[in-house]
Image (spheres, coloured by chain):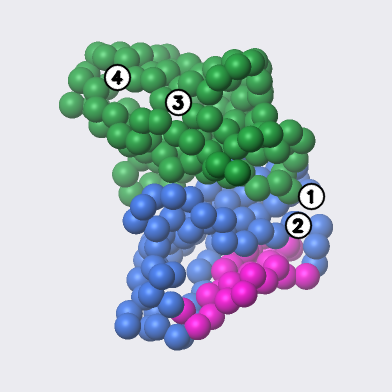
Amino acid sequence: NAGVMQNPRHLVRRRGQEARLRCSPMKGHSHVYWYRQLPEEGLKFMVYLQKENIIDESGMPKERFSAEFPKEGPSILRIQQVVRGDSAAYFCASSPPSGQGKYEQYFGPGTRLTVT
Amino acid sequence: AQTVTQSQPEMSVQEAETVTLSCTYDTSESDYYLFWYKQPPSRQMILVIRQEAYKQQNATENRFSVNFQKAAKSFSLKISDSQLGDAAMYFCAYRSDYGKLTFGQGTILTVHP
């Protein structure tokens, strides 16, 4: 059973470009979470999605960031007009359908975004 | 909002010795879950141990155990017989009955041979 897949693993963008980060959850998982880790810091929650629904986006910056989890295909975290402060590691996690707290969130390997 | 605090930015231990990492949290909820994650240099997040708040018994996974003090809102991780492969960043995390994880700032653990 393949784990959570994220691609690309490394992404370099110039200021003002768009960044698209992809996450394929584990098979059978329908809950996806995105977290951001700035250098020397812990992971910070960004958004929680189920298929075709955003459940909690309280951690998402109000501008330039968006996320989706379509019925088919991976979850996408999109950052428009990137700035140097967006440079970070972005982690995706998935959990089983119930979404209950007792179930582990399985993490992907992360995407390291560098904005030059 | 829930908060998680790890007051030890760095800890070190001799190989084969025991080390305890501290974590405190703040919540008004009664049902929740606590986790310790390990992040080695590869950056992959690895679940070390999990504790359900409604369970009084402390969780144990091989060399890893926790001291869960619900009233004090404290959740420390004890690593026994430390190994070189235990060297990593350790994060304490809180999760309510539904939804996101809230992480502490992390503790860097160094293991000396």
Numbered disc in front, either 2 or 3: 3
Q: Is residue B54 left or right of residue B6?
A: right
Give the quadrant of residue B8: bottom left
Q: Is residue B21 above or below residue A80?
A: below
Mark 2 nearby-residue class (10 Å; few <14, some 14–19, many ≥20): some
Q: Which secondary structure lies at badge 1? A: loop
Q: Which secondary structure lies at badge 2? A: loop
Check the rendered structure and report the hue given to chain B: blue
Q: Is residue B72 above or below residue A77?
A: below
Give the quadrant of residue B73: bottom right
Kind of residue at badge 3: Arg
Q: In the rendered structure, does residue B66 fall within the stretch colored magenta?
A: yes
Q: CA distance from mark 1 to mark 2?
A: 8 Å
Verify CB contact (< 8 Å) between mark 3 and mark 4. Answer: no
Chain of the residue displaying label 3 = A
Q: Which residue is mark 4?
A: A82
In the rendered image, the quadrant that contains the N terminus of chain B is top right
* Residues shaded magenta: B57-82
Q: Which residue is mark 3?
A: A22
Q: Which secondary structure lies at badge 4? A: loop
